[in-house]
Image (tube, helix red, strand yellow):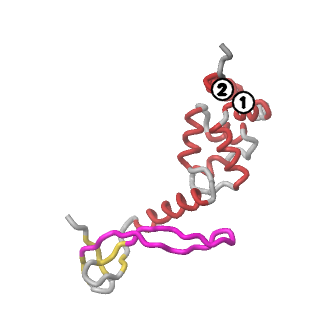
Amino acid sequence: MKKKSFCTECRRETKYRLKKKKMQKWIKDKEHEFEITAAVCEECGEEINIPGLLDRNAREIDEQYRLSENIVSIDDIHKLMDVYDIGKAPLSLALGFGEITITRYLSGQIPSKEYSDSIRRVLEYPRFMMQKLQENRDKVGETAYRKSMGLAEELDNCFNVSDK
């Protein structure tokens, strides 16, 4: 079943198809090429607006930008919180960030390269998480500290290879 939407060129409801198209966009003084989704009227070939397309393209651009600039994804941050069983505010504090930094990243703000690298490093190296927890122990609540430190130690032990 083909979907229909109003085509402003044809001035009526027409069938449309989705196709990928390339677009250029300047972000932080650098030109990037993105592949986004367009809805095209099957009658006249003009692009049309359909519900949800702007949001979809915003997500596509965000994902492609993060990938091209090697910035952690929102999924990576969620994974980190799951791995160490830690909430947004305690994680922010454990990493030495402001208390609401992780909350902002989860709602779509793009982290700086430096903060992104810290998040990625903690995700990849349990010892780095242990170090960050130790450094910021006085800022992180005792319960969050013990729980996350225990999980970090457990993960780190999985990577230790015995000489035997």
For the C terminus, the image quarter is top right
Q: Nearer the viewer, residue 13 or 66?
A: 66
- Residue 138 sits above or below residue 112 on the image: above
Query: Of the residues under marks 2 and 1, which one precedes in the sequence?
Result: 1
Q: Nearer the viewer, residue 7 or 132?
A: 132
Decide whether the magenta segment is chiefly helix, strand or loop.
Answer: strand
Which residue lies under the disc numbered 2?
Answer: 156
Q: CA distance from mark 2 to mark 1?
A: 9 Å
Which residue lies under the disc numbered 1?
Answer: 130
Q: Nearer the viewer, residue 39 or 32?
A: 32
Can residue 143 be seen at all in this image of the molecule? no
Report whether 138 appears left or right of 23: right
- Mark 1 element type: helix
Q: Amino acid at mark 1?
A: Met
Q: Nearer the viewer, residue 53 or 162?
A: 162
Q: Is residue 112 magenta?
A: no
Report whether 144 appears left or right of 55: right
* Residue placed furthest toward the top: 164
Mark 2–mark 1 CB contact (< 8 Å) = yes
Give x and y (percent) for residue 156.
65, 26
Can residue 157 be seen at all in this image of the molecule? yes
- Residue 9 sits above or below residue 132 on the image: below
State which mark lies toward you, 2 or 1. 2
Determine the image quadrant of residue 42: bottom left
Range drawn in magenta: 15-38
Q: Amino acid at mark 2?
A: Asp
Give x and y (percent) for residue 15.
24, 74
